[in-house]
Image: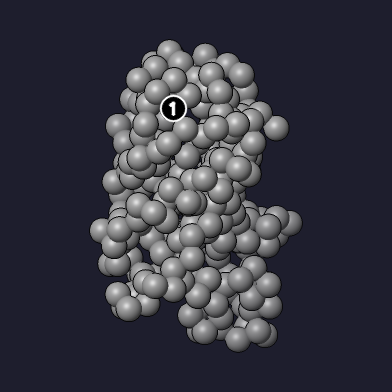
Amino acid sequence: MMLYKFCKQEHNIAIGCNTLRLGTLQEYREMDSSFYIADQWEGISQAGTNGKPVTFTGKELSSAGVSLPAMSLGPNDSVNLTGKGNLIMKIPNVYIFSVSSKESNDSLKDYDSRYTIYNPQSFASELVRLFINQLSFKDFDFNFEYGNYLVSEMNQINIQCIHQPVKYKEKPFIYNEENKIEVLKIINNPVESYFTKSVEKNEDEEYRFVILPTINRQIISVKKEAKILNIRAFNGIINV
């Protein structure tokens, strides 16, 4: 599978650039909306009923991964959502590297160059290696509600890179009695949310690499700022 990274010529790592930029969900969400790559829905999982009542039983919520004690519900209890009925899930901020399965993209008019990734898995493995060698405590947002870790616990950190095509859906999600479990699983699962974008961006045919730092399988949130990795040539993995 071949993937394509569109960029400015000075940022093309296939022709001499020795740095690679990892953006974050929060950065793209809060970016000036006049930039094409800005996306107000990045890192936000939100669903509403569109005015029609929807009932979730405790068993249904549990099957979607929602903590029943956190909602003061038992498996035989139920909760009714009416009106707007919005559910907004705060998900950890992560580093992402976005490419495309398209050979050309007219929407990215500011970019005058591109390179090809020939082996996505090898590229992902190299991203992990580079990140591990250059990570810093300063990269992480320890004020995030899921990030209360002791410095002594950071030696248990696990770094992986998940990569796959982005799925495009209407945002915010609208759920009803038929699709409520499917939608709830998406908004309650950070990894699923990382690879779900608004349908208005579907022409990009985006393929995304997500750097996932975890401790005891819990994702550690990173700060808003992008991370610049110093790199060496990705021999046999990329080309112009």
Is 136 rendered above or below residue 166?
A: below
Coloration of the structure image: one colour
User: Pointer 1: what residue?
Assistant: 13
Give the image location of residue 108, x and y in percent: 46, 19
Judge by depth and name the residue closer to the eye, 192 or 232: 232
Left or right position of 40 against 125 = left
Is 201 rendered above or below residue 128?
A: above
Give the image location of residue 121, x and y in percent: 63, 44
For badge 1, the amino acid type reads: Ile
Give the image location of residue 16, x and y in percent: 40, 23
Judge by depth and name the residue closer to the eye, 18 or 215: 18
Give the image location of residue 212, x and y in percent: 49, 57
Judge by depth and name the residue closer to the eye, 59 or 148: 148
Q: Quadrant of residue 124?
A: top right
Can residue 100 be seen? no
Q: How many marks?
A: 1
**Which class describes the residues within 10 Å of circle 1: few (<14), some (14-19), or many (20+)?**
many
Q: Quadrant of residue 206?
A: top right
Judge by depth and name the residue closer to the eye, 182 or 167: 167
Badge 1 element: loop
Q: Residue at x 55, y 77 (%)?
A: 67
Q: Quadrant of residue 59?
A: bottom right
The quarter of the picture where the N terminus appears is: top right
Can residue 149 be seen? yes
Q: Residue at x 60, y 43 (%)?
A: 122
Q: Residue at x 62, y 39 (%)?
A: 120
Q: Residue at x 50, y 75 (%)?
A: 216
